[in-house]
Image (tube, rainbow, N blue to C red):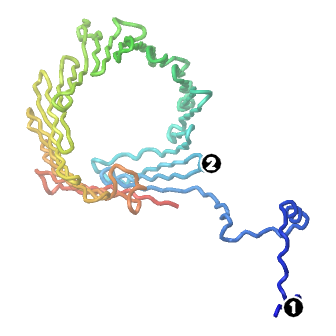
């Protein structure tokens, strides 16, 4: 039996075309959708300048050093302050604390203040049109004495560079570089003497020749011939008796037997050094003439964590040895002996010895050194260097 018409489901409404739908929404706007809390972007965080304080103590120099740095000008520059003070004592290695240092550092501008002389060194640079770059620096330390201050300005492009110095009412051009075939340098000193140099390429070859002379000239110019394996220069030299002679200086390098041989000649003395190095071994003999002084250095890498260095001089019988061991990335120790001072020593580093404090766990570095004189063991000393950083 068929269901009554009143109880049957109503037919679906006819589909609306796009124009009607758009008109309906325009005529009867609904409430704006409320974004969910999960999809809403977080409110902007207030930027605060990060303050970093680093303290270091050197027991050998008996000196504390503190450095404070923070970002200023919305992170475009950094303010750095250094303060040093000693702990007193009459140790031989104790040094006088250096004066405080204040500096404002930015990408193209910096100011370094000398608190003792009450002066400042200003440096700035700017990129102009194309490849032209302008740089300048100004030192005000002489203003308080009534003298003209020092000013330096330079401009450089791909083919031309020019720099000028202004000091004590003197303006000099210090360098002119034209293309890659010609270069002119001029330096002026306070005693009214200067030096001018001209360098040029010999065609398309890698060899160059340079002529330089003092201003005003007092003899033949110095001639320097530069080639890929070294350079040789000839100049006049004054003897104690007042006579002039020609002095030849030069350095030559060449690859010999999987190593590099270097010969340095200066003032009638020659030093010949050979250096061989591979992944595990380094051997460096050296001979000086005419003294016939012979020495050699030897380095051996046993493992990635162990290394031995040894040096010996035949004329003085002086020798030294150092053994290094790296336990981990931030822990290493080394021990050595020096025969001329008859001194044995050992050093322990906790932290990267050559890196920055921010790369070290717990933001600290510690070095402990023990020195034991062979002739007087009772005068053994332990020295330490501690560097700690705090971030706020």
Q: Please state the horizontal and vertical placement of residue 65, each as a whole percent of the image.
A: 42, 52
Asked which quadrant contains residue 47, the reply is: bottom right
Residue at image location 27% in from the left, 55% down from the top: 383
Name the secondary structure under disc 2: loop
The vertical placement of 126 against 57, above or below, is above
Residue located beneath label 1 in the image: 4
Q: Is 103 or 116 nearer to us in this picture? A: 103
Residue 181 position, x and y percent, is: 44, 14
Left-right relation of 252 to 391:
left
Q: In which quarter of the image is the N terminus?
A: bottom right
Report the residue that reaches farthest toward the front: 1
Local packing at callout 2 (Cα closer than 10 Å; few below 14, some 14-19, many 20+) is few
Residue 34 position, x and y percent, is 76, 70
Judge left or right: residue 38 versus residue 122: right
Residue extending furthest bottom?
1
Up the image or down, 154 lies above or below 313; here it is: above
Label 2 vs label 1: CA separation? 82 Å
Q: Is residue 147 visible?
A: no
Q: Contact, CB < 8 Å: mark 2 with mark 1?
A: no
How many discs appear? 2
Please, what secondary structure does the residue beneath circle 1 have?
loop
- Can residue 217 be seen from the camera position used here? yes
Within the image, what quadrant is residue 185 found in?
top left
**In the drawing, what numbered circle is on residue 73?**
2
- In the rendered structure, which disc, 2 or 1, sits on the residue that comes first in sequence? 1
In this rendering, the label closer to the viewer, 2 or 1: 1
């Amino acid at each position: 039996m068929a269901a009554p018409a009143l109880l049957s489901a109503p037919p679906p409404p006819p589909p609306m075309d796009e124009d009607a739908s758009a008109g309906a929404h325009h005529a009867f706007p609904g409430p704006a959708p409320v974004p969910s809390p999960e999809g809403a972007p977080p409110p902007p965080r207030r930027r605060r300048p990060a303050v970093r304080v680093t303290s270091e103590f050197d027991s050998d120099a008996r000196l504390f050093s503190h450095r404070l740095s923070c970002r200023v000008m919305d992170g475009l520059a950094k303010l750095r302050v250094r303060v040093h003070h000693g702990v007193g004592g009459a140790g031989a290695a104790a040094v006088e604390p250096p004066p405080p240092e204040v500096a404002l550092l930015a990408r193209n501008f910096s100011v370094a203040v000398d608190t003792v002389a009450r002066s400042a060194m200003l440096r700035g640079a700017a990129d102009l049109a194309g490849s032209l770059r302008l740089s300048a620096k100004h030192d005000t330390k002489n203003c308080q004495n009534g003298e003209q201050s020092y000013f330096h300005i330079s401009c450089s492009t791909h083919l031309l560079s020019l720099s000028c110095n202004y000091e004590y009412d003197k303006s000099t051009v210090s360098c002119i570089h034209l293309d890659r075939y010609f270069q002119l340098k001029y330096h002026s000193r306070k005693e009214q003497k200067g030096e001018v140099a001209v360098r040029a390429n010999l065609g398309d070859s890698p060899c160059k020749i340079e002529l330089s002379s003092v201003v005003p000239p007092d003899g033949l110019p110095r001639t320097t011939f530069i080639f890929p394996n070294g350079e040789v220069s000839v100049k006049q030299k004054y003897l104690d008796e007042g006579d002039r002679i020609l002095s030849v200086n030069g350095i030559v390098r060449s690859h010999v037997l999987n190593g590099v041989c270097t010969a340095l000649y200066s003032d009638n003395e020659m030093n010949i050094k050979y250096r061989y190095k591979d992944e595990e071994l380094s051997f460096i003999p050296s001979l000086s003439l005419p003294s016939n002084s012979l020495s050699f250095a030897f380095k051996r890498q046993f493992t990635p964590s162990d290394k031995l260095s040894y040096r010996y001089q035949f004329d003085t019988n002086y020798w030294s040895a150092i053994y290094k061991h790296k336990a981990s990335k931030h822990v290493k120790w080394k021990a050595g002996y020096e025969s001329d001072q008859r001194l044995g020593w050992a050093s322990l580093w906790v932290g990267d010895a050559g890196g920055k404090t921010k790369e070290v766990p717990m933001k600290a570095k510690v070095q402990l050194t023990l020195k034991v004189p062979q002739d007087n063991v009772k005068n053994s000393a332990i020295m330490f260097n501690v560097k700690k950083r705090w971030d706020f």
